[in-house]
Image (spheres, rainbow, N blue to C red):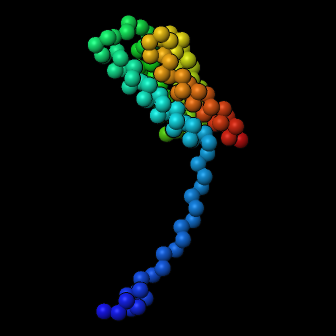
Amino acid sequence: MNTDSQSADIAPVAAAEPAAPVPASQLWGRAAFLLAGAAQLITISALLGADRPPVTWAALLLAIAPAPLGAAVVFTRPPVAWLAAIAGAAVTAVGIGGAISHTGLFFVPALVAFIVTAVQLRREQP
């Protein structure tokens, strides 16, 4: 068995073209989605745990809304994503204000990511 004949049969692999860079808004949107989802899971766990905080409108808002809005930011087109980022920032800010003493502070990083995403999407629009 000759190794030279085997290497001649294999075609050289063409160099792949570099992928297009991911916009900053997409990166921040992914961060908002992941941070909101993680904080939402913490809130749901707290509401179902042994030492339950009082179930208020703010706790329910934080347990339901941020992650779906983060998903809308990531998986929709820029005009809709911008509206979802603004809605996510507003919902998260209102929820933090109402549940600041229990689980609201877990959402501060997600709030920052929603705000930065909205600003970046606005700058990227023509």
Quadrant in the picture for the C terminus:
top right
Quadrant in the picture for the N terminus:
bottom left
State whether residue 120 is above or below residue 60.
below
Is residue 116 visible in the rendered image? The answer is: yes
Q: Residue at x 45, y 22 (%)?
A: 65
Q: Which image quarter: residue 25?
A: top right
Q: Which residue is drawn at 53% across and 67% down?
A: 16
Q: Which residue is drawn at 48% across and 21% down?
A: 106
Residue 19 spot, x, y in % from top left = 57, 58
Is residue 95 visible in the rendered image? The answer is: no
Total number of numbered labels? 0
State whether residue 110 is above or below residue 78.
above
Residue 117 spot, x, y in % from top left = 60, 33
Residue 46 spot, x, y in % from top left = 35, 17
| Residue occupying the far left of the picture | 50
Q: Which image quarter: residue 63?
A: top left
- Residue 40 is left or right of residue 16, and the answer is left
- Residue 13 is left or right of residue 17, and the answer is left
State whether residue 48 is above or below residue 73.
above
Q: Nearer the viewer, residue 107 or 92?
A: 107
Q: Residue at x 47, y 10 (%)?
A: 101
